[in-house]
Image (cartoon, helix red, strand yellow):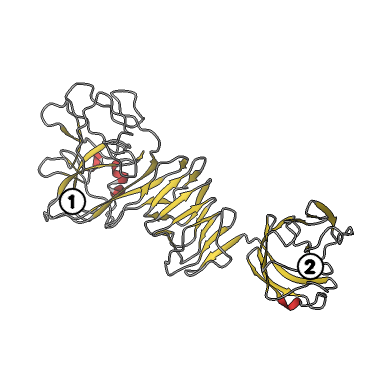
Amino acid sequence: MKKNIHSILTGLLFVTASLTSNAQTFSGTTVSDGYTNNVAVGAGIEFNYGGSTYDINPSNSRITFYLPANGTFTAATYTWTFTGGDLASFTSITKNTGLSTLSNQANLTASVNGKVITFTKSGTVGGSGNPGGYIVWDFVSVATPTSTTWNGTTWSNSNPSSTINAIISDVSNTAPASFTCKNLTINSGAALNITGITATVNGNITNNGNGISGTGNLTIAASSALSGNSISFDGVLTVNTGATLTTNGFLTLSSNNTNTASLAAVAGTISGNVTVERYIPAHSSRAYTLVSSPVSSPTIKAGWQEGGASTPNYGTQITGANTGSIDGFDAVSAAGIASIYSYDDNAIGSKWVGLANTNVNTLSAGTGYLLFVRGDRTVAPGGANSSTATTLRATGTLTTGTVTFTTSGGTAGTAPLLGTAAKYSLIANPYPCAIDWLSGSITKTNIKCIFHGI
């Protein structure tokens, strides 16, 4: 029951009703009497107007303006916004002429945009001689969606958010604008193109299609697990503080002739194996190349020799100086020269020391090698002098966080530095990203800063 308000209000009274099962908050602009309304909508609601509280008997999905006798709408527009609860937006609002009694009611119209309702006055509404009355609007509300689908042109149910799942059904590979979502699902035949954008994911990623393409940014903002098909990723991957990305073996940081994927500084955690690639272009003559791996654990043969398989466009054949397949090599060098070396400045004679095997020696982040790259696994020793393009890849656990190279007791897997003055040590970039060896963020103690890299 409403209290008698005619003696204390000369302007507008706004009455509203229950919208959904959850409570909503309704706020609006200052109206003609100088007050701002705040309405809590739900069972047992109260209407607070200018410091006085009135009980309201709500009706479903209905907004009612009550104008007292001789009252008038003075502002050109009145804008009201719903916040909170499970209401996403209004789809329509219609004047209920059967219940509306106020004269000149046609001069007040309403429009909706999401959760915002705007009432616009096009002429006199109320005023001197007005007997008082109501203008009643009925509207249809929409519950907050749980998901929205990108079809290559638009999102089906407004933009995703940290609480709304994103579904990618686009087969045209058209990038949306930057977005944030809860879970990310890529449908069969579709791919998410992130060229020029940032996709921020707060949940799991399910790839039922062709994964994530493009050279943009993928940010894991909350714990996430990969499932479905493997994802070959070309962009920049970021894992935020407190987040854990569980790869389940489905992630490849890919490399090709135009771009190489990169891992930004990891504030969270990456759990599970990752495949990391490095593209090596063709050369007019075969050459030795300084190489390393940012993942640890696999043997050289399992990684850069593709486990012995003749895989086109990947890996390379590695020969031993004196031994062949028994030690993991593809063949014995006819010239008695190994095609993969480590560096030891204490060695007598040549400081480049040929590896004794590739089926026992494992790749370790921070350990560098000098590798003769003939081309991919289909290119046998001998033959043409020129090389073909190939991609070296290895699968294992990524190195993140601080890596320390010391004469002893450094990060596990790193080769110890030589402690003798004027001696060189070969160390390699332990991360799947570019680094600046001369950066002030890299602490160097008792080391002369002379670096050579390819």
Image vertical order of residue 212 relative to residue 249, above or below? below
Please report the residue visible at 56 percent of the width from the left and 68 percent of the height from the top: 156
The three-letter code of the residue at mark 1 reads Arg
Q: Position of residue 11 (x, y in %)?
A: 78, 63
Q: Position of residue 296 (x, y in %)?
A: 36, 38
| Residue 35 located left or right of residue 351 | right
Q: Nearer the viewer, mark 2 or mark 1?
A: 2
| Residue 364 located left or right of residue 48 | left
Circle 1 Cα neighbour tier, 10 Å, few/some/many (<14 / 14–19 / ≥20): many
Q: Position of residue 5 (x, y in %)?
A: 86, 59
For mark 1, give the secondary structure: loop
Q: Closest to the observer: 215 or 314? A: 215
The residue identified by callout 1 is 374
The residue identified by callout 2 is 64
For mark 2, give the secondary structure: strand
The three-letter code of the residue at mark 2 reads Thr
Q: Which mark is residue 231?
A: none
Circle 2 Cα neighbour tier, 10 Å, few/some/many (<14 / 14–19 / ≥20): many
The quadrant the N terminus occupies is bottom right
- N-terminal-most mark, 2 or 1: 2
Please report the residue visible at 80 percent of the width from the left and 62 percent of the height from the top: 10
Q: Closest to the observer: 205 or 194? A: 194
